[in-house]
Amino acid sequence: MSSNSPHAGVSAMSVYVPRLRVSLESWCQWTDNSWDKIQNVVGRSFRVCNSHENVYTMAANAALRLILDNDVDPRQVGFLGLGTESSTDNAAGAVIVRGMLDLALRKLGKPPLARHLEVPEFKHACLGGVYALKSALRFAQCDGRGRLAIVVSSDVAEYERGSTGEQTQGAGAVAMLVEAEPKLFAVDLVNSASASDYRGPDFRKPFARHFTDGYAPNTERLSDFPVFSGKYSTVSYLDETVHAVEGMLSKLGVSAGQYYESVQALFFHRPYHLMPVQAMSFLYARGLARGDNHHAELRTLCERVEVSFDDVLSETASVPDLYGPILRGDLPSNPYEATSKVASALRKHRPFLDLLDEKMRLGSESVKDLGNLYSAALPAWIAAGFEQALLDGVELTGLPMVAVGYGSGDAAEAIPFSAVPGWRTAAHRIGFHRALSNPIDLDQAQYEAIHDRREADVEYEPRGEFRIARIGSQYEPAFQDLGVEYYEYDIESA
């Protein structure tokens, strides 16, 4: 893809994660979980916010780094989009990030962001950042008229202590600079594909849960813990990503086998390490079923796990109603039992493991130290992938890659993209590993105190980052700011 490609895309990326880190090996010792299992399924560590941080401070930190590291003229930015499911204000969103950026830019002697600036927030579970990116790309290609767009995905993933999701926590933000003539990678929106279907109580954060007896019994604080059903959510993830990817393949006019052979890198939404592997094995099994010339390989796998070859073909052609049984009061079930067993066999099949190692290796090890970043998980993996390609001397220019986003509830996006000539210069400024440097490892008492919003004995004074300065408390007829957060930026120690 040439630099004068008709596709808009991303010119720069920047990553921010909190310094406070929880080692999952230590967490396994505290909670009597299997470290062998956790490191293979989940990863190595996750980050948590300190008391001065939230989704907006992380977003502003990532966006400010993006502007400063790439010498962006704030006056040329016409779009600032925020993708998140962890926002704490139901009226304002990206404009809060805008306010912090203006504050810091003025302190740094730079002009603030343009007054004529769109500031939307996008919310759909973990897919909000992808929707924000697509909107920014359309802005750059349509009414932007040469102006720049910034997209920030920022989230805090937290679960109740003792829950089945506790090990999949995390916090962080990724900012992207979008323009009509990209310098890092171009996005092929024309051949991207969307898929969605309502899945009821898949993974939700209903407001009413805070006033219901039995919710979050192990914590006394107001929390953003989700209501979720693990197995139902996993099947929903697989089902929707399949429809998005197969829709993209149809637009591209290629078979699954052709695409998986030619694609340079695969990036999926990544709530934990194993999920993209499960998704890819499921997609591969369906690809075998759809391609007549691969049926011999599929039959062999079916025999290995003792499932019917015809059942896999039938499941591949089916369009199951996952939500129907829930409405009837039944427990969730897996309508892809045979295909799932074949996919499980694939994850032990050397040729498939070699394919995964080739197509999903860029950045995969690095993001094991991030934890779950919800909407920021996919762009963080892409950022890590470009940085690894730069360090390892991997050539990416013009080669096809794909980003597969997912949001519970549920919806998915499959988006082709490719690196543009000169991408190495932009990749050099991403700073993924720099963002993860100098962590502060928490012990059990510190982690539990921070998680439960109690005072924690942690030696950490924020430097060169945004912080919550105070929270408003006035609630009078003449003036009200109850609960409104006020922010500050310490330039002297930046």
Image (cartoon, rainbow, N blue to C red):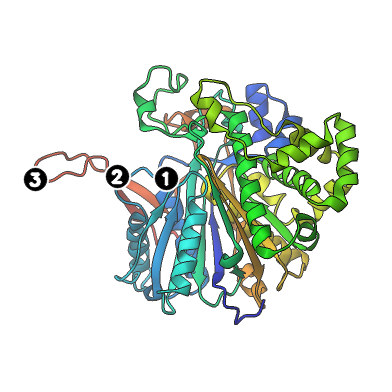
Mark 3 or mark 2, which is nearer the start of the sequence? 2
For mark 3, what is the residue?
A: 478
Q: Secondary structure at mark 3?
A: loop
Residue located at (43% from left, 43% from top): 86
Which corner quadrant holds the C terminus? bottom left
What separation in Å lies between label 2 and label 1 (alpha carbons)? 13 Å
Please state the total of marks drawn on the protein image. 3
Residue located at (83% from left, 32% from top): 308
**Residue 333 x, y percent position in the rendering:** 63, 26
Mark 1 or mark 2, which is nearer the start of the sequence? 1
Q: Secondary structure at mark 1?
A: loop
What separation in Å lies between label 1 and label 3 (alpha carbons)? 29 Å
Which corner quadrant holds the N terminus? bottom right
Question: Splitting the image into 4 quarters, where does residue 8 fall?
Answer: bottom right
**Residue 230 x, y percent position in the rendering:** 60, 30
Question: Splitting the image into 4 quarters, where does residue 249 fall?
Answer: bottom right
400 over 218 or under it: above or below: below
For mark 1, what is the residue?
A: 54
Of residues 312 and 453, which is closer to you in this image? 312
- In the image, which is nearer the foreground, mark 2 or mark 3? 3
For this orientation, the residue located farthest to the left is 478
- The type of residue carrying mark 3 is Ala
For mark 2, what is the residue?
A: 470
309 sits to left or right of 226: right
Q: Residues within 10 Å of mark 3 (few under 14, many from 20)?
A: few
- The type of residue carrying mark 2 is Arg
Of residues 48 and 118, which is closer to you in this image? 118
Mark 3 or mark 1, which is nearer the start of the sequence? 1
Residue located at (67% from left, 37% from top): 42
Q: Residues within 10 Å of mark 2 (few under 14, many from 20)?
A: few
Q: Is residue 19 visible?
A: no
Q: Secondary structure at mark 2?
A: strand
